[in-house]
Amino acid sequence: MLRALLHWKNLIALLAILIVSGTIFYSQYLAKKIAIRERQVVEQWAEASQFLIRAPIDAEILFATRILTENKTIPIIETNERDSILNYINFDTTKAAADPAYLKKQLQQFKKSHPPVIWTDPVVPSRQNRYYYGESSLLDQVRYFPIVQLCIVALFITLILISLRSSYLSSQNQVWAGMAKETAHQLGTPVSSLEGWLEMLRDVPGTEKIVPELEKDIRRLQLVSDRFGKIGSKPQLEKTELVTQVREMVDYMKKRAGAGVQFSMEVQATHPLHVLLSPPLFNWVIENLLKNALDALNGGGAVAVLIVEDANVVQIEVADTGKGIPKNEIAQVFNPGFTTKKRGWGLGLTLSKRIVEQFHNGKLFVKQSELGKGTTFAITLPK
């Protein structure tokens, strides 16, 4: 599913690049053609304007007048050789009348945009009329069209990617739920059978030391089965005293850690911290974080648990002095299958993140990590 999603992302990105590139090239081609045509119109307008001054023939005057009046889109400013404004066309007359500097500002912009069309008096060569012009609304639309289309394509791609990601996450969640339910179901039968055998062993002489240990293992299997069963369906949250819950798991893991590992737990709160939890699932999260810390220590170092109360949330931090996580791998630690250990499926942190964020409306993230100095995971839960 992940490969298919990446394939679709690449295909969509390539298609978008081709569409936008083609649009930009074609729009530039059209813009150049329109710009050439508009300059020709300005040249005709300039010739017609001068022709009307000196033409004696009525028919030609009518033709020149037609050329002048048909230009309703291209703004033109006529000046003399000293760039004093003589005439203008296709401007907002209200703005021109209200602001004496309006036409001068437009003239400066036109000078930067295009070289003027120059008419030289054949009788007095030093006398010139210059025609500065801007761009029509059509040319502006053609120039800005690729940007508009780029925004539309980007929005379209974003919606498709969001849809594909939502579909992928939904399928992934269904796989997790199905796998969890099936695991809980498969564990149920052998655990029930083991409980029966345990009751039979109680009556057998000489098993007094074996039975308690077997009972602990069976209870552990029941706990695992219960956890998987709760992942497969929406668990019921209970109002729970957080510090007590975390301390139980710290004490549990402390007994199973090596002598070279030092545990510490600090609580920065002046009163009991009650939050809504699913105790079996939340215990699993703390257990996974503590196990990861122990694996990073390789038998020697320190694990520190800190619980801090904020205005709206409670934060639990699990820090170790282990090997740390490379920066390029921090973003992958919660991905299914990612692991740096020789054994395991790389699902512990993935399931932990799902439990915290989907079932408890909290967040689980790597707060900080440095190679050779250790890693700190943090959980935030709403109060």
Image: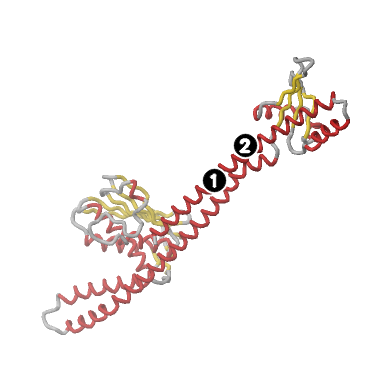
Direction from residue 242 to residue 87 in the image, left or right: right
Badge 1 amino acid: Gly
Q: Residue 32 carries which label?
A: 2
Q: Nearer the viewer, residue 66 or 216?
A: 66
Measured as percent of width and height from the top left, residue 279 is found at: 36, 68
Badge 2 amino acid: Lys
Q: Indicate whether 168 appears above or below 53.
A: below
Count the marks. 2
Residue 197 in which image quadrant: bottom left
Direction from residue 188 to residue 311 in the image, left or right: right
Measured as percent of width and height from the top left, residue 43 is found at: 73, 29
The residue drawn where x is 88% and y is 30% is 58
Report the Cα–Cα distance between label 2 and label 1.
16 Å
Residue 251 in which image quadrant: bottom left
Direction from residue 83 to residue 23 in the image, left or right: left
Estimate how packed mark 1 is, as few (under 14), some (14 to 19) or many (20 or more) residues with alpha carbons within 10 Å: few
Q: Indicate whether 131 appears above or below 381.
A: above
For marks 2 and 1 on the same chain, the one whose residue lies earlier in the sequence: 1
The residue drawn where x is 41% and y is 56% is 7
Measured as percent of width and height from the top left, residue 2 is found at: 39, 59
Q: Residue 22 carries which label?
A: 1
**Kind of element beneath mark 2:** helix
Measured as percent of width and height from the top left, residue 110 is found at: 69, 29
Direction left: furthest residue: 206
Q: Indicate whether 22 appears above or below 67.
A: below
Residue 82 in which image quadrant: top right
**Kind of element beneath mark 1:** helix
